[in-house]
Image (cartoon, helix red, strand yellow):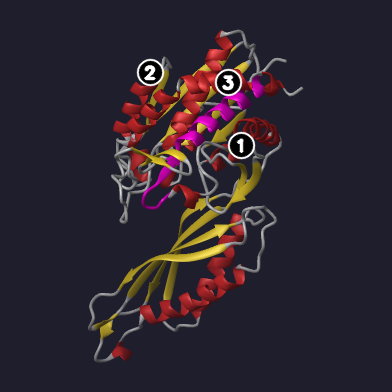
């Protein structure tokens, strides 16, 4: 018999006992803005620390040095770690969620920082607010899963190992001063990691992401005598035409990972020129290339650089500079990650009453930093089946509070399975 078969009722009871408090905990986190940009998140960390300490947790705060914060374009960030030891020996399992969020943007019908709860006729109580699903929800999922585990251990459940909560604030800026910094500084050395995700599937792989900034240089000239200049915008148009043709070709490269289709390419920013009556001497644009798990990041970058340079070479007098802004590696399963997946799937099926799938997702997350450090890592937490269902990075972001309850029980049960001495 699987260890988790022996305590689902006790686990769910422990979670239900705290559910009202978990809702209040999450609402308090949503009400404090953490838009990134601008990324001024230290105040939220203080609020989160106080809330965690009120639950009885010992919290260690790690302010990130100002130069490191500024290097990623943020204003302030403080990472939090909660450490809980059970018994002796056993693995250390890190649970990571990020508190920074994208700015609300337009289109909201509710206060993005109101944490308003609406009784949805289909899904029950639903909380609205920026970050309520991505991923302040998993501050609550993981904190109250650990609290449930503490309750069962106090009642005699024998566990051996440790659980750590890693609560960070720079996912929207790439994770370099959050999870990557905690690991690089030796502030935590977990054996496994579970990172923020959604409830109806365990994510075991995701795309990587490459951001390049391309600067196309020509020579200014008077618009009445366009031949006196070298038109950087005309050259950029040719380069973009090649890139968009390449984007269509990328759709033929199919991923074998369920949930991931093919590589993508997007040009998201462009600027340049001097004035309407001047031949533009400089144009700058940025592109986003998603790298599927089967691809090499280095090869993807080299291919793009070659295409851009070849297109520029066809434009006499034009120079091109290419700068890498971001190279986020894909998440691929490491040996040992299957233990996390099996435990979460087994426990999730108990609490959700339906199979919990395993899949990949086309976006990229902080989970890659744990995998890059050799730590078997998956994503699982509170949320609906898709990012679109949650309104993640969109207006009226929401979380079904029944999913929060069941995901919390699932994570607690999986932790108990992994740390059980039986």
As drawn, the label of residue 168 is: none
Give the extent of the magenta segment: 392-419
**Residue under numbered circle 3:** 11
Disc 3 element: helix
Taking depth in this image into account, of 68 and 117 the one nearest to the observer is 117
Residue 74: x %, y % from top left: 33, 43
Pointer 2: residues within 10 angstroms few (<14), some, or many (20+)?
Answer: few
Residue 374 shows in the view:
no
Q: Return the x and y of residue 295 as percentages of the image width and height.
A: 64, 57
Q: Earlier in the sequence, mark 1 or mark 2?
A: 2
Q: Are marks 1 and 3 in contact (CB under 8 Å)?
A: no
User: Disc 1 designates what residue?
Assistant: 377
Instruction: Tell me the CA gap for discs 1 and 2.
Output: 27 Å
Q: CA distance from mark 3 to mark 2?
A: 22 Å
**What residue is disc 2 on?**
53
Closer to viewer: mark 1 or mark 3: 3
Secondary structure mostly seen in magenta is: helix
Whether residue 67 is visible here, answered yes or no, is yes
Q: Nearer the viewer, mark 3 or mark 2?
A: 3
């Amino acid at each position: 018999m699987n260890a988790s078969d022996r305590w689902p009722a006790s686990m769910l009871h422990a979670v239900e006992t705290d559910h009202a408090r978990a809702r209040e905990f999450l609402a308090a986190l949503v009400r404090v803005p953490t838009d990134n940009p601008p990324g001024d998140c230290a105040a939220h960390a203080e609020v989160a620390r106080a809330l965690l300490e009120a639950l009885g947790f010992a919290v260690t705060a790690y302010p990130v040095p100002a130069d490191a914060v500024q290097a990623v374009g943020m204003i302030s960030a403080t990472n939090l770690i909660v450490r809980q030891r059970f018994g002796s020996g056993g693995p250390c399992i890190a649970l990571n969620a990020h508190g920074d969020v994208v700015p609300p943007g337009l289109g909201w019908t509710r206060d993005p920082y109101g944490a308003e709860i609406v009784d949805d006729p289909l899904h029950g109580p639903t909380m609205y607010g920026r970050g309520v699903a991505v991923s302040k929800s998993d501050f609550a999922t993981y904190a109250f899963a650990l609290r449930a585990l503490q309750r069962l251990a106090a009642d005699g459940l024998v566990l051996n190992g440790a659980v750590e909560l890693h609560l960070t604030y720079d996912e929207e800026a790439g994770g370099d001063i959050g999870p990557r910094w905690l690991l690089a500084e030796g502030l935590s050395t977990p054996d496994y990691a579970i990172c923020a995700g959604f409830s109806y599937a365990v994510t075991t792989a995701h795309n990587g992401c490459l951001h390049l900034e391309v600067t196309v240089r020509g020579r200014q000239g008077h618009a009445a005598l366009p031949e006196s200049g070298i038109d950087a915008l005309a050259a950029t148009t040719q380069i973009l035409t090649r890139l968009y043709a390449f984007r269509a070709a990328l759709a033929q490269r199919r991923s074998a990972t369920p949930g991931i289709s093919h590589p993508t390419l997007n040009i998201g920013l462009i600027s340049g020129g001097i004035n309407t009556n001047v031949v533009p001497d400089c144009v700058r644009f940025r592109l986003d290339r998603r790298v599927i798990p089967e691809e090499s990041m280095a090869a993807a970058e080299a291919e793009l650089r070659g295409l851009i340079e070849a297109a520029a070479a066809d434009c006499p007098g034009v120079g091109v500079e290419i700068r890498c802004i971001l190279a986020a590696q894909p998440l691929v399963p490491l040996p040992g990650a299957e233990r996390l997946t099996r435990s979460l799937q087994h426990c999730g099926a108990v609490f959700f009453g339906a199979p919990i799938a395993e899949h990949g997702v086309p976006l990229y997350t902080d989970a890659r930093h744990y995998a890059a450090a050799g730590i078997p890592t998956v994503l699982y937490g509170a949320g609906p089946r898709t990012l679109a269902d949650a309104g993640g990075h969109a207006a009226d972001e929401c979380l079904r509070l029944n999913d929060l309850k069941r995901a919390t029980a699932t994570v607690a049960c999986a932790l108990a399975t992994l740390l059980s001495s039986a």
